[in-house]
Image: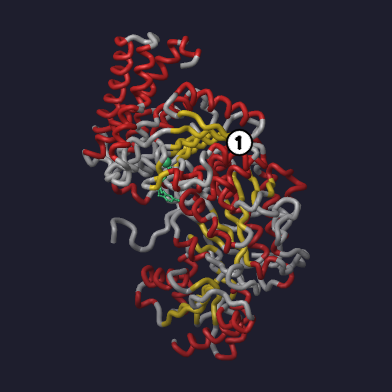
Amino acid sequence: MSDTLTDAQLWRDRYRLMVLMRRFEEACLTGVASKEIHGELHTAIGQEAIAAALAEHIRDGDSLASTHRNHLHAIAKRIPLHPLMAEIFEKETGLCGGFGGHMHLFDRERRFSTTGIVGASLPVALGHAYAAKISGRDSVAFAVIGDGSVNTGGFHETMNMASVLGLALVVIIENNEWAISVPFSAASSTPTLAERASAYSAPGERVDGLDVDATSAAIGRAVAHARSTGPAIVEAMCYRFRGHYEGDLDLYRSQTEKTDRTTTKDPVVLLRAQLRDSGMLDEATLGELEAEASAEIDAVLAAVRAESQPDRSLAHDHVFASGLTVDFGTKGAVA
Amino acid sequence: MTDTAVAPRNINISQAVAEGLRLAMEDDDRVLVIGEDVATQGGVFGSTRGLLKAFGPQRVLDTPISEMAFTGMAVGLAMEGYRPVIEIMFVDFIGVCLEQVYNAIAKIPYMSGGRVDMPVVIKTAGGSIGAAAQHSQTLWGLFGHLPGLRVVAPSNPYDSKGMIAAAVASNDPVVFIEHKGLLLERAQDFEFGANVPREAYDVPLDKAAVVRPGSDLTLVTLSGSVRHALTAADAAILSGVDVEVIDLRSIVPIDWDTIGASIAKTRSLLVVDEDYLGYGLSGELITGAIERFGLGSLDYVGRHGNPGVPVPAALSLERQIVPGTESILNAIVRAGAAR
Ligand SMILES: Cc1ncc(C[n+]2csc(CCOP(=O)(O)OP(=O)(O)O)c2C)c(N)n1
Ligand SMILES: [Mg+2]
């Protein structure tokens, strides 16, 4: 562990945030079991350290474009937990009134968006980065993507253009070794994704994404480069703990490997042990932080559960911002 | 529509569009123009000429050949409060960036529950000019099929300037489809919409125009086909068919008031569409007319357009596939006989 371990408050915050993220995802899992969330759900259990590290660098004026596996990025961007969870639970109180759902989260004020289309967040981040440049703001555009995203054409176009224009873009790749059933090793022409940065005259750094401290430091370096020069890439190594989506039988992975990785390489468990063993935080403090985080999530979950889905009469709203409606003589319920 | 007392200015449609953009950019500094060859060259058809000089390289951005990236950029820029106009040089190229158009630009207002609007103009050129299968499509039916996009295709200089201005001012995303066969035509060569005032004005995005009154047959068409339809309609007088020609101007939404008023008079509807006939605008117009005005409101419906064939290269083949004056006249005569 690094020298920053001397800062007990920092480590309390980090640990609490990572536990909160884990509890948040676990709360979402209960929504799948109870069928309150219908459709697929992607959780980022096992990837908390990366989002927690991002949270330390991303400022309110910065933007963040995320993916289908986005809940923890939203938390890192300080999207309030209640509307966030309510949207995932398809409630009228959700961030988008229940029109978006867990893959389509939008918060304009916080410059946050997600997309269910792999690779499609990158060009959006490019737009934020260009906006920062031409409006003379020093904000950074962040895009968090999976290892699979890096193989899309959008990655190449975005990195090239960001480099040509010298834009403040930080791309954080959560390399969880899998893109649904295809392993990273079978999908990448390069042994690391970080090294692809050199094609765009950008720095790329691979880091242990289970280590919040190392990841935070790497993101810090990327942000500094982005502000002064142009795009930078951080490839944070991690492991997808659950199936690609809830309900995925996940038969394509070795169960032994999965059990081993999820039990011996859990970033939350590892951090807890480090903090306790080093004497940074004692058992009682760790327990308190866990209880606090759990209570916070429990309260949000209870509130969300009590709320309603949007009234079905609203289904035709918002197709056009202007209020234009295109009716086919069949407006109303499904004909 | 125009003041016929004033001689038309010696400009073409591209210049009219560029003038509309320039005035919109003067009026609102959140408006940006982004695309390939739009800055230094002023567009391969000249429809962004002069903008770089007037507004500089940040607001008028020449991009690498990266449609996916710059179309998605428009999404991020719109979320930041800008009003980007992105140019897809030929509408045929939309295949490489349709993702950002239909999954992001068109849907974000809805997916966000009305919290995030997308004031983006997708400006592009379509239509046949002898460039064959990959550079001749119009594709407005494709865009019209996708929820969340306004789709317009002007047919003359006056509308081109006024509609690009209205598109930029719209808080909805607008697909603005120019016709390559019209862009370089001089204003004075147009029978209608030839006079382009120098000052700023808007032409509504949702109104069709009756460009030739008639009593026997309602011919609804748009974009490059309007001229051909007018010529054919003049010739059809000899066959005893008095055609009312409607320039649709907007594919989404469709101006049913104008069409309904015409059908009430003629009880006959012929759609002339340069786009593919299948699953497209012509079917939408005919079905929509029946839904709205009733089965009993029409004695005749017909459509004439691209019969679901890639646009061929040889002129002899192209003429067989793309509606022209002669083929439209034939369609009118058939309609007249069938009434
Ligand atoms: C363009 C596109 N292709 C395919 C999919 C289906 N899909 C959703 S997630 C996914 C795998 C993504 O892998 P990765 O980027 O590594 O993210 P992870 O799921 O591992 O977080 C695929 C193929 C999609 N949503 N979009
Ligand atoms: Mg992955």
Position of residue B257 measured from the top left corner of the image (x, y, whole percent): 46, 65
- The quarter holding residue B29 reads top right
Quick check: A182 above or below B241?
above
Q: Residue at x 33, y 16 (%)?
A: A289
x and y percent of residue A273 in the render?
35, 17
Output the chain of dot 1.
A
A321 displayed left or right of A317: right
**Quarter of the picture holding the C terminus of chain A:** bottom left
**How far across and how far down the image is residue B140, in percent?**
52, 64
Which residue shows up at 47% across the image and 25% down it? A53
Colour style of the rendered protein structure: secondary structure
On the rendered structure, is B138 left or right of A292?
right
Viewed as shown, does residue B74 lie left or right of A94? Answer: right
Q: Quadrant of residue A138?
A: top right
What's the residue at 65%, 38% (across, down)? A201
Residue of label 1: A231
